[in-house]
Amino acid sequence: MKKQLLFLILTGASFTTYAQKLHASYEYIPSAVATFKEDVYYENGSKIAVRDSVPLKTAIGEIETPDGEIASSFSMVLNTGASYKRIVMQQENVDALQETRALQGVNYIVNDNFPKLSWNTSYQDIDTLGKFICHKATTTYRGTKLTAYYTNDIPVPVGPYKFGGLPGLIVMLYNESATPNYWMLKEVSYPYTGDVPVSESYINSLPALSLQEFVQKDEAVIQEQMRIMESKMPAMEGVTVERKRVRGTVEQVYEWEKSNKEN
Amino acid sequence: MSGKNQIRRTKLPARCAGLFIGMWMTISVSQAQVCVSGKVTSAGKPLGSVRVDLCSADSIGLVQYTFTNQFGQYRFDHVALDQIVLRFKALSYKSLDERVSLRQTDTLFNVELSAGGVERLQEVLVHAKRPYRLGRDTIELQTSSFLQGDERTIEDLLRKIPGLSVGNDGIIKIGDKEVEKVMVEGDDLFGKGYRLLTQNMSVKPLEKVQILQRYSNNKHLKGIEKSDKVALNLSLKADSKNQWIGSVAISGTPVGKQYYAGSINVMNFGKKNKYYLLSSANNNGVDAVSSINHLLYSAQTDEAGQIGTDVTTPTIIDNSLELPGFDYRRTNFNRDMLHSFNVILNPREDLKVKWLGFVNLTKKSFYRNTIQTYDVEDISFTNRENNEFSKETNNYFSKWEMQYDVNKRSTLIYTGNLGSLQRNDNGSILFNDVASKELTWGRGLLTNHNITHTFKVSPTAALVSSVRWILQRSPLDYSLDQYYYEDLFQTKDVANVTQHIENNLQYVGITSQYVKKSSHGDYLELAVSNEYKDQNLLTDLVLHTNDGQAISPNGFSNYLQLRSNNSSILAKYTIKRNKWELTPQLKAGFVASRWGSVSNENQKNYFQFSPNLSTKWSMYPKGRLEATFSLQQNNTELTDIVPNYYTIGIRNFVKGLDNITLLTNYGGVISYTHGNLLDRFFGSLSLGHHTFSNYISTSSLINPNFTINRQIVLKNKKSSFFKAQLNYYLKPLNGNLKFDIEGRYSSYETAVEGLGFRQVHTDSYDYGLSFRSVWKSRLNIYGGYRMESKSYQVENKMQLNNSYGFLQLFLNMGTGIQANLKNESYRFGDFMGSKSKAYYFSDFSISYDVKKIKTRFDITAKNIFNNRTFQQALLTDTYQAITSYQLLPRYISLGIDYSF
């Protein structure tokens, strides 16, 4: 399945008449101090999203320097090993998608049985973002509420990361959270004649995991790091630390966790 | 339009025909719903990714939309309209609108699109706004998005917001950072004590929750000053009715001696006005005022443009008890009462008025027995002294604040306070079997007014200016009904000794500070200040003879006036680059001082320089090096220049230098850190050394009945330290092992009258080993052992060895039941001929939180081994002492905490 999809996307194999590639470039803002570039390529119902592994440099004038002290013993970054580009491959009308995820320096191809997004497009809200008149739509997704603004001017069901399926290209998308993740469209070009920077042989060489397997593996590593931190903190009388899992992504609750809860 | 359209009854593919025909016929007949499908082609080839909109023919409203699949097919199910418009849109093709009448249960509608429409797109979007985020650091969340119906308090709601975590103890964190404060409509009442609010306030009046990142207390410094603080702001619904909410907590001992604690919190938050009332009383050793410290001392000294935040009259007679490293509640026999009323009014959008009033009536007592041994060359004697002190404090205090936004770029804040501070200390002393009473009483007055103006010059620069006026009077009267000073005054037949003290301060300070942050993160601070201080100290020691005579001995009365004007500048610049940071700083000033009595006034003017250089360097991803080098010049304070002796209580007399001196010291501290709290290994090492070119030391006159200390200025004092801490997470044990070591050394001189100057060397070492578990089980432990060794070397070397061990057990039953057992042992080595001695303490508490009835029950057992005394040893360059303190006995109290 994975190989078939990859073949379709990368070769642009066409059952249809002169299909042309669309390229949308987003800024992904997971926190106030980091912005990543995310390129989305779309052709014939197949989508590839490629997110850079290093954050964008701050534009001069825009005060965005991380205020984290460079030498403070309390500013820390979870050690996730080497960072890789994050690639999401998706085919319209196919529930499963593939994404690459790295864990402790190893890159995996992860199979995600992606839940179908049921968008509510009945909002009257209209906003002009850049040149585009945008309409609001919302949906719930893995424990968070997503809000998207899409434009009817570009009638493709495309958006950043794993998102899409709206009547037009998503211009802005965020999740409602104390730590929201933003995606903002910065550039769109059509037809796009450049290549998709993804190597088929590389993707095929990666070890495969299901999303559930990956998340469990990943969180075991993070949990251990959190426990290491807790063990180094001063203990307070009458205070017990609640080891609550906080996921800093748009994905807060997975399908298998819901069914566990219900059971 | 070259599209070729056709409507015909179609034959469905054989494999799904049975299913569709059976199902759709039933549905379409019963609900008059039909299915519309078809194929989109261009030049005979199927077209994928074409958007197909199904609109009602009556209006242009979109009913459904879909995209064609890779075979060009589309399908709409459950269409309940007779007349529809199908709209076909795709890049590189002309749009097509087709009106379709739905008369069949399955309608097939194929279209052919022709090239055209949007054929090329090359758009770059700029200035896309983020409606969800109000500016880069504020995230606004609509409460309604997160409510599921079972929330009662703010805390219940916050638990449901992804990214926010609320601990069992009510601590709110965003990621790993605890929030600084939780405000209501921008007003902060509780600071870090926000749990009082979040655990009691109902979620009903709430409209929005704002998360303020990189929060600054001064709103105009937001984005300019360095800040990693996070705060929450709760925004209320416009029509939210004022609601009274709060909590009551009562605990007490059911049997034996009565120990109790009770408190009531009542609050009401409206959109415009907010009220908060607090009353508490206890006799279980807890300092009641500590619960509202954040209301009283809100002035942030680390903020730009502040002046005179620590100016106060000196304390002349201090009878408070300090036992470092020991829980103060064990020795504090108290009766505390506190009432506080706070109100915030927002009469206009640009004006905010706060008022805070409190009454604090306390009585604290302690009991101690001291054996003091002097053995300095030929001076050798031992004193025994038993003290019982009770300290009554009656404080009435009021504070107010007015905040006015002059315009969008500037704000004026006025804060003022007025307080009456009354004390009454009563000491019963048994000194070498001679009883005496020592009384200290006085009623002080304090008023402090500050105006701060902030002007935001640009988005990256601001000017903060403040002016402050302080008036403080701290008079005291002292009396001792025994006469120990015959050797000193050569006067006989004295019945008692009194001392009257007038201790006044008037202060005016003005400052203006400019702060600017550049795009690289470089940070500039420039400040100009002027401070004028007028201080008076009058002390009058009188010997009252048996025949009613009052004698004022020579050299034991003071009338000192000190007026000083200090003009200073501060320049500080932080150069911040990727891996390093360098901050040179210069503080320079000119001080003009006049001091003396009415008839004899002295004058001294001098310049003062205090340069400082600090740096931070990220050597490698896990390694950091920090260093600070400084030269400091400090003024002598009022008590340092007092010309004659005065008593500071319990047979001690002191006097100052009778001169003004500029004290200079220089030195540096270097620290190296490897790893951080998330790494299995995390270690740090610090080294520091300071040289005091001149420093204040004492010359003591030692007599068995009294001690007289005269301040002297000496040269060349050295002090150094090292400190290392190593942490290692032991995977097999699931816990952190920590090793600490610290050493401090100093070398200086003191003098003893008759013996001359004495060189003193002090060393102290601390070694500690501790383990903290993070087991997944209900039980966790935290235990450790620390050894301490102190030595003084003058003529001989004197050494003191102590150790401290502890083991804490935490039990979390998970159903609202939590238990905590704390065991401690203090061991003192051989000292002053007494054998080593150990003290064991154990405290236990268990609580049960029943959320359904908003009530928490707890049982606390304190001092389970019922230790009634505790001993501590003290080493100085002239004497050694062992002091034993009386402790609160064992008690078990039952408590209940109810929220309404």
Image: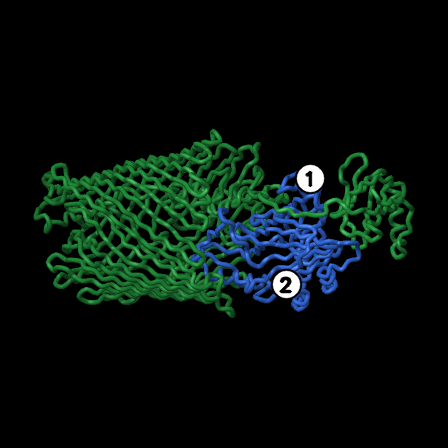
Of the image marks 1 and 2, the number of the one nearer the N terminus = 1
User: Which residue type does callout 1 highlight?
Assistant: Tyr
Up/down of A101 relative to B448, above or below: below
| Quadrant containing the C terminus of chain A in the rendered view | bottom right
Residue A113, given in percent of the width and then of the height, sits at 71, 58
- Where residue A74 appears, as percent x and y from the top left, is 45, 57
- Tell me: B428 left or right of B773: left
| A201 to B79, vertically: above or below | below
Q: According to the colouring, which chain is green?
A: B
Chain drawn blue in the picture = A
Figure check: A67 above or below B566: below
Question: Circle 2 is placed at which residue position?
Answer: A214
Q: Outermost residue, bottom direction?
A: B732
Q: Nearer the viewer, residue B38 or B697?
A: B38
Q: Nearer the viewer, residue B696 or B859?
A: B696
Residue A138 falls in which quadrant of the image?
A: top right
Q: CA distance from mark 1 to mark 2?
A: 36 Å
Residue A33 in sight in this render: yes
Determine whether the residue tagged by mark 2 lies in a helix, strand or loop: helix
Q: Which residue is mark 1?
A: A123
Quarter of the figure with residue A53: bottom right
Disc 2 residue type (three-letter):
Phe
Q: In which quadrant of the rendered view does residue B98 lie?
A: top right
> From where the camera sits, is residue A234 visible?
no
Residue B129, position in %: x, y?
A: 58, 42
- Between A187 and B34, the one lying in front of the other is A187
Q: Using the image as rendered, state which of residue B609 and residue A246 is in the foreground.
A: B609
Q: Is the image coloured rainbow, by chain, by secondary structure, or in one colour?
A: by chain
Q: Is residue B67 left or right of residue A260?
A: right
Nearer to us of marks 1 and 2 is 1
